[in-house]
Amino acid sequence: MSTQPLLVDGDWRLPLQLLGAFRAENPMTGEPIGPAYPLCGTADVEAALSAAAAAAEALAATPPEHIAAFLEAYAAGIEADAEALVELAHAETALPKQPRLAAVELPRTTNQLRLAAKAVRSYAWTQPVIDTAAGLRAHRAPLSKPVLVFGPNNFPFAFNAIAGSDFASAIAARNPVIAKAHPSHPATSERLAQIAFAALKQTGLPPASVQLLYHFDYGVGARLAGDARLGAIGFTGSRAGGLALKAAADAAGIPAYVELSSVNPVFLLPGALAERGVALAQEFFASCTMGSGQFCTNPGVVIVPQGADGDAFVVAATAHFASAAPSVLFSRGVLEHLQKGVATLRDAGAAVLVGGSVGEPGFRYAPTLLSVDADTFLRAPQALQTEAFGPVSLLVRVRDVAQMAQVAQVFEGNLTGTLYSANDGSDDAAWPVVAHALRPRVGRLIGNRMPTGVAVSAAMNHGGPYPSTGHPGFTAVGMPAAITRFTALHCYDHVPEEQLPHELRDRNPDGIARLIDGVWRTDDLEPEAPR
């Protein structure tokens, strides 16, 4: 069977061990499209891992300017090929060319790459700290091992295993990347890898710094995730898949940064509903159905007070959902999982207000709104927090602010939590009651905005407590913080000046920001400073 080549050890070549092949499917029709891509066996995975491990030391020693040049050349290459990339991604995901792919996601991707390059040049990700009295100096450094990156289905550019935030972060920290493409968009990933490899050759990075595998089965993936030659794993996807990889990685002591699932609760405080409830219904509907609801920050649970204002919100939201056509989902698998998620919610006591049906052709599902009372939710919080990845949301009707806080206290860890409050101050007393219960359970607390969308900012936290991610202390978005996931903390105790890394030496000609004796400074150390 003829398949597309893999990118392994600086060479585009056919697989050594072909276990099968797959093609992308057009989500709008359900029909296969594009060429066949290989399902790899252990021989190809071993070749990629061995090559990456061999390249790790050389990449760790590569001057930062070369790393930054690669990231910028890659961004420029993506922009030069934008039209073809958008066409491929649209065909494989059914996401709109405009504005989503061309005007939003592709620029976001190149911006991430350039922000990573900026962090490389400034040494910001290394976080240098100097204690002159103790003679100690520390910074973050490369893992000197490869990073395995799994891309999700919902962002063919910005979170792609070969171009997204995890990729940019790992490369910025000078670690080789083995990218495992998502089978929903293999041609998009292949094209990105071609551009990345051209940038790699242009800037002189080791050939195995960037490698691409399209797909492998569970057993092969588990063995790779548990191989001690790996330095870390970056994963965005389903809870079941991420936890399986994390278990294999944990057994081998490999850090696994996994983004798993999130229902992103939205709390509508009473004053906000009284003030602008009908407008909030429109805002909620737009957020829930944006991108067919296939965002990890989709508002999956909305907490609505009982009473006339809450009822008006529900009526308005139901009307919006009822008027919408079935949404196109990424794949057959997404549709099947969505159906199972809705069935779980119904079995736990939620009633379908509107939607709940499959559409045709292709992979379509009607925008769906369910409802449950707070007492039922509090009796079965785990089942009623089941993520329904798609244009689906659950309304939880609460008696008062006190019960709203009770509901907040039973939420699992989430990426985001939102509170809507009145502009006239009538919710000022209610806000801290709910926020106090919600704050420890979310990575990002949002005020008066729906959660959909994640800004690429140094202040962003795209992470949260388990099970939204595997570790609450890290973010997958925002440079330089996202880079620190793929680093090791190195300490130097009375090491001679000439043997120290550049950013820890007494002389600081580049004006690197360093924490010296508790004070951030960008100047040189005094020559007589104790060592």
Image (cartoon, helix red, strand yellow):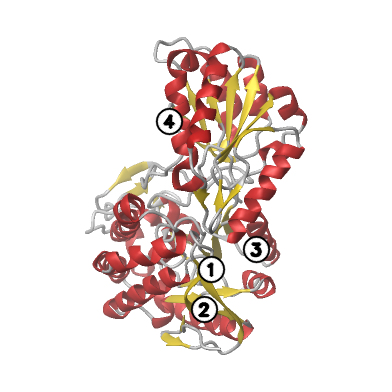
Mark 1–mark 2 distance (CA, rounded to whole Å): 9 Å
Q: Of the residues shown, which amino acid type is indicated by label 4?
A: Arg
Question: Which badge, 4 or 2, comes first in the chain's sequence?
Answer: 2
Q: Which mark is residue 183?
A: 1
Q: Secondary structure at mark 3?
A: helix
Name the side, left or right, on which 446 lies relative to 261. Answer: left
Mark 4–mark 2 distance (CA, rounded to whole Å): 41 Å
Q: Of the residues shown, which amino acid type is indicated by label 3?
A: Leu
Q: Are marks 4 and 2 in contact (CB under 8 Å)?
A: no
Residue 272 picture location, percent across and down? 47, 17
Q: Nearer the viewer, mark 3 or mark 4?
A: 4
Q: Residue at x 61, y 26 (%)?
A: 437
Q: Of the residues shown, which amino acid type is indicated by label 1?
A: Pro
Mark 2–mark 3 distance (CA, rounded to whole Å): 23 Å
Question: Which badge, 3 or 4, comes first in the chain's sequence?
Answer: 3
Q: Residues within 10 Å of mark 4 (few under 14, many from 20)?
A: some
Question: Which badge, 2 or 3, comes first in the chain's sequence?
Answer: 2
Mark 1–mark 4 distance (CA, rounded to whole Å): 33 Å
Query: What residue did someone put label 3 on?
Result: 245
Q: Nearer the viewer, mark 2 or mark 3?
A: 2
Q: Which mark is residue 37?
A: 2
Closest to the observer, 71 or 130: 71
Q: Quarter of the image holding residue 232?
A: bottom right
Residue 243 picture location, percent across and down? 67, 57
Q: Are marks 1 and 2 in contact (CB under 8 Å)?
A: yes
Q: Of the residues shown, which amino acid type is indicated by label 2?
A: Tyr
Q: Quarter of the image holding residue 518?
A: top left
Query: What residue did someone put label 4 on?
Result: 449
Closest to the observer, 268 or 137: 268
Q: Residue at x 48, y 46 (%)?
A: 462
Question: Which badge, 1 or 2, comes first in the chain's sequence?
Answer: 2
From this view, report whether residue 165 is shown above or below residue 84: above
